[in-house]
Image: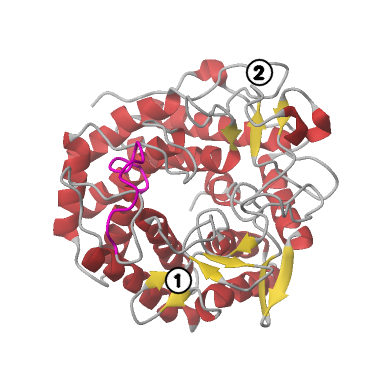
């Protein structure tokens, strides 16, 4: 098998005065110190879109919502905080993370009888919604499955905690809702959006039948099967064989973009194909992950600082929206870390190159904390796509002066810990 070996020409060593662990620590400090409040006795985010002081940006679609959905990422944030609490031995932080878990489990996001997940709470009206547009007309089943995966990962960190069983039950409910209500399309893949009944929604969406979001549904089936909670081997085979036969479904995972190729979709493809190869021993899936998916991912990486902005090592999102968003970059770092693990026994040169690339991405991310509170920008707008009025210090080209505290700001924790403290 030929490795997709990243080039060392982009290599960006961490700043010795500001290491990767300090970057992760600052992201945690910002999320916990500036972006939390209480809801019915549980910790929750004040907003899913904040400025460098933690103030909610009410004018934005994400500004007055919070919850476990894609943009808000409450459970993903709790998972990252638990990882950091375990690393640092910080029991107070651990209790905060557990309170966030309780918020997702107990505060009316889950329809326990069916498994349906309401991803968002509107903070000013206390309404629950299926999507970030604050309607119940549609939801993304793949993104709901992503929350199910987060539930299983979090349960794995809580072996002796009462919450673990409820998290697994909720994850099974989500997967059952998808399995019983969402019929794959004629191309063998999941629709990007569905109605609350599971029917395809908005088939005029340019990527309604080939979004990378569907990979999360496969990941959830595989994760439940790995843990002996269900057996979805046949469904995993069917979906990934359709994926491979089509040459990959890597359209936009982000709900508000519409490209056929998105960098984070290639990162997720790499990770899910490697996960499913470990489950079902499919060298063809492993080959696709390490050749096609990694090659596609590398095509988005920038080799230089552009327009006077620190972009070297970062990956831009997609051709129609070329900002470098940091949750996607953190996911890319995870993909390269897992590729390095897959190559370690047979191709040490490729493994080492993938590890260096993951480190380069995290070092590039670490260049974009701003202000005294640890704020990490949501994205680096090197080509002024978002607009100068939304940049730090009003720069024509530069970092965006907002972030999603549990998504873009916190997602660096896991890849940092896996790189710096493997095992």
Q: Is residue 214 above or below residue 225?
A: above
Residue 341, by quadrant, is top left
Q: Is residue 218 shown to the viewer in this render?
A: yes
Task: Indicate yes or no whether the magenta region holds residue 208.
Answer: yes
Dominant SS in magenta: loop
The reply, left or right, for residue 328 in relation to residue 31 is: left
Q: Position of residue 423 (x, y in %)?
A: 48, 53
Label 2 Cα crowd, 10 Å radius (few <14 / some 14-19 / many 20+):
few
Location of mark 1 (residue): 155
**Circles 2 and 1: CB atoms closer than 8 Å:** no
Quadrant in which the N terminus appears: top left
Find numbered disc 1 in the image and state the secondary structure of the residue it sits on.
helix
Decide: is 378 above or below 260: below
Between residue 193 and residue 293, name the one nearer to us.
193
Looking at the image, is mark 2 or mark 1 earlier in the sequence?
Answer: 1
**What range of the chain is rendered magenta?**
198-213
Residue 305 is tagged as 2
Q: Residues within 10 Å of mark 1 (few under 14, many from 20)?
A: many
Could you tell me residue 165's position as x and y percent? Answer: 41, 80
Where, by quadrant of the figure, is residue 168 drawn?
bottom left
Residue 99 marker: none
Residue drawn at x 74%, y 33% as measured from the top left: 16
x and y percentages locating residue 397 in the rendered image: 72, 23
Q: Is residue 358 left or right of residue 54?
A: left
In the rendered image, residue 339, in percent from the top left (x then y), is placed at: 38, 37
Question: What separation in Å lies between label 2 and label 1 (alpha carbons)?
Answer: 40 Å
Q: Is residue 72 magenta?
A: no
């Amino acid at each position: 098998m030929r490795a997709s070996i990243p080039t060392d020409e982009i290599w960006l060593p961490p700043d010795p005065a500001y290491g990767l662990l300090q970057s992760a620590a600052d992201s945690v400090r910002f999320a916990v110190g500036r972006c939390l409040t209480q809801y019915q006795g549980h910790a929750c985010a004040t907003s899913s879109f904040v400025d460098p002081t933690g103030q909610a940006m009410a004018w934005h679609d994400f500004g007055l919502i919070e919850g476990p959905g894609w943009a808000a990422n409450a459970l993903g944030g709790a998972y990252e905080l638990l990882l950091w609490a375990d690393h640092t031995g910080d029991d107070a932080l651990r209790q905060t993370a557990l309170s966030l878990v309780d918020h997702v489990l107990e505060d009316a996001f889950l329809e326990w009888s069916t498994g349906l997940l309401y991803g968002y709470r509107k903070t000013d009206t206390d309404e629950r919604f299926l999507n970030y547009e604050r309607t119940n007309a549609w939801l993304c089943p793949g993104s709901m499955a992503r929350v199910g995966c987060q539930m299983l990962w979090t349960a794995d960190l809580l072996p002796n905690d009462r919450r673990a069983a409820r998290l697994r039950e909720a994850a099974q409910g989500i997967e059952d809702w998808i399995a019983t209500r969402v019929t794959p399309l004629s191309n063998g893949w999941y629709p990007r959006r569905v109605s609350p009944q599971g029917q395809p929604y908005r088939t005029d969406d340019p990527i309604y039948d080939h979004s990378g979001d569907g990979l999360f549904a496969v990941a959830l089936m595989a994760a439940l099967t790995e843990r002996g909670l269900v057996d979805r081997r046949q469904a995993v085979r069917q979906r990934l064989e359709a994926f491979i036969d089509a040459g990959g479904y890597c359209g936009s995972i982000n709900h508000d973009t519409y490209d056929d190729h998105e960098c984070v979709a290639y990162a997720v493809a790499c990770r899910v194909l490697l996960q499913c190869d470990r489950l079902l021993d499919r060298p063809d899936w492993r080959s696709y992950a390490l050749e096609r998916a990694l090659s596609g991912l590398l095509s988005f990486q920038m080799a230089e600082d552009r327009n006077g902005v620190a972009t070297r090592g970062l990956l831009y999102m997609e051709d129609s929206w070329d900002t470098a968003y940091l949750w996607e970059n953190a996911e890319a770092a995870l993909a390269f870390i897992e590729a390095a693990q897959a190559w370690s026994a047979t191709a040490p040169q490729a493994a080492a190159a993938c590890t260096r690339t993951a480190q380069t991405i995290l070092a590039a991310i670490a260049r974009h904390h701003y202000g005294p509170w640890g704020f990490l920008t949501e994205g680096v707008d090197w080509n002024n796509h978002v607009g100068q009025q939304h940049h730090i210090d009003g720069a024509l080209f530069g970092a965006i002066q907002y972030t999603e505290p549990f998504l873009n700001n916190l997602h660096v924790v896991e890849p940092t810990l896996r790189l710096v403290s493997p095992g």
